[in-house]
Amino acid sequence: MTRAIVLVLDSFGIGAAPDAADFGDAGADTLGHIAAACARGSLQGPETGPRQGPDAGPSKRTGPLRLPNLARLGLFHAHRDSSGSLAAGVTLPESVEGAYGHAREISSGKDTPSGHWEIAGVPVRFEWGYFKNQQQSFPRELLEALIDEAELPGVLGDCHASGTEIIARLGEEHVASGKPIVYTSADSVFQIAAHEQYFGLERLYRLCEIARELLEPYNIGRVIARPFAGDDAASFQRTANRRDYSVEPPSPTVLQRLHDAGGEVVSVGKIADIYAHCGIGRAVKASGHDALMDATLAEVARSATRAPGERVLIMTNFVDFDMVYGHRRDVAGYAAALEHFDARLPELLARLDADDLLILTADHGCDPTWRGTDHTREYVPVLARGAGLTPGPLGERHSFADIGQSLASHFGLAPMADGESFLSAPLKGAS
Ligand SMILES: O=P(O)(O)O[C@H]1O[C@H](CO)[C@@H](O)[C@H]1O
Ligand SMILES: [Mn+2]
Ligand SMILES: [Mn+2]
């Protein structure tokens, strides 16, 4: 059996990309700034106090950032190489057990689909459509068509917003009026927030499907359903029933190629939605990092008894780094979530065979110390282990697509059009 496990730590950037200034992100560094904040002293949980649901805050934590297992895979080496300095308060391990590098993005956007598709060997070279106006963000004819087709009394929002802030601000008016809340961000997205009980979850999903069709001329990457629950502004919480309606990748990703060649592609979490279900053989849902790790471990166990010729790719997206901590600019929460992920990593490492390929990476940055609430254009870590890889530096990778190309090579597929495999690459640079 040939097997690969790809874990995407959503938004875990490791330093500003060479083109970060084009995005207003020169100096952004998700890992570096989290480590610096931790090293400055005790970093308690979020100032907003404990929250519940998918946007729940973290447990409290103190002291320097502790990620011993990621460090052994080469995380801090990769960050040092990408940012030029060692993250504050951390120590390098005596020896590394992973092949580590830092990858830049060649896709035009810093959004989740672009990052994931490029990871899977298909960079996005075209420009997405964006709704750039902070207020009255959406074209009047689009909203009129949506109101008409979905038989709505109107819509609220129509602006750039943070999803938790806008339901606190407009949620009660939404419940009273029946008007859904529509908003966007720096990403190519059309998001619709509505109350699960008062508006109805299925009705929200249908509304998103209508929006998906109406947005066709605007070249928008995703429509996102953002259901929430609760009694009033103080208690509104988004639920785990978020659903993303993505357009399809512009050409077959390595997931699709493997699927077409008879391999099994297993999505854990929102991977299936991000790839518009293209090339996904089996989709396992889970909400929260513990459940996502549990589901990943279960899939690793399930695939352990495969016949010699079979090929399995398990891909998991750890979304809370981005959705719950990065966009919420919750530094302590992000740090605690990283430490928790790190603590669970040995469970996975212990279940892998020597010829399995494990890759940990990210799809973009979302520096929780940065201005605004949007993603940041950053290098992402490429931490790989197994499949004959020699521990040590992989150097700067010129595209996330090096991961897709390496997966194609691992599975014996025809080479992808983009990317350079690091499986057989000579070591670059010194550690
Ligand atoms: O603020 P929330 O609703 O979490 O939205 C964020 O999540 C979207 C999709 O990842 C981003 O475009 C950003 O707007
Ligand atoms: Mn993302
Ligand atoms: Mn995001």
Image: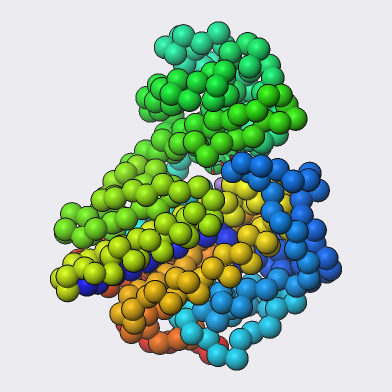
Viewer-nearest residue: 244 or 232: 232
**For the point 58% across and 70% down, which residue is it?**
343
**For the point 70% across and 34% down, which residue is it?**
165
Residue 76 image position (x, y, % from top left): 61, 77
Question: In screen coordinates, is 279 left or right of 61?
Answer: left
Residue 231 image position (x, y, % from top left): 68, 24
Task: Answer yes or no: is residue 357 visible.
Answer: yes
Viewer-nearest residue: 133 or 242: 242
Viewer-nearest residue: 68 or 188: 68
Residue 178 image position (x, y, % from top left): 58, 13
Q: Quadrant of residue 221?
A: top left
Question: In screen coordinates, is 262 left or right of 237?
Answer: left
Residue 164 lies, with reference to residue 202, above or below; the image says below
**For the point 46% across and 33% down, which residue is it?**
223
**For the point 54% across and 51% down, which residue is it?**
288
Viewer-nearest residue: 364 or 133: 364
- Colouring convention used in this rendered image of the protein: rainbow
Residue 102 image position (x, y, % from top left): 52, 71
Task: Answer yes or no: is residue 191 visible.
Answer: no
Residue 199 lies, with reference to residue 80, above or below; the image says above
Question: In screen coordinates, is 129 left or right of 367?
Answer: left
Residue 59 lies, with reference to residue 428, above or below; the image says above
Residue 279 lies, with reference to residue 276, above or below; the image says below
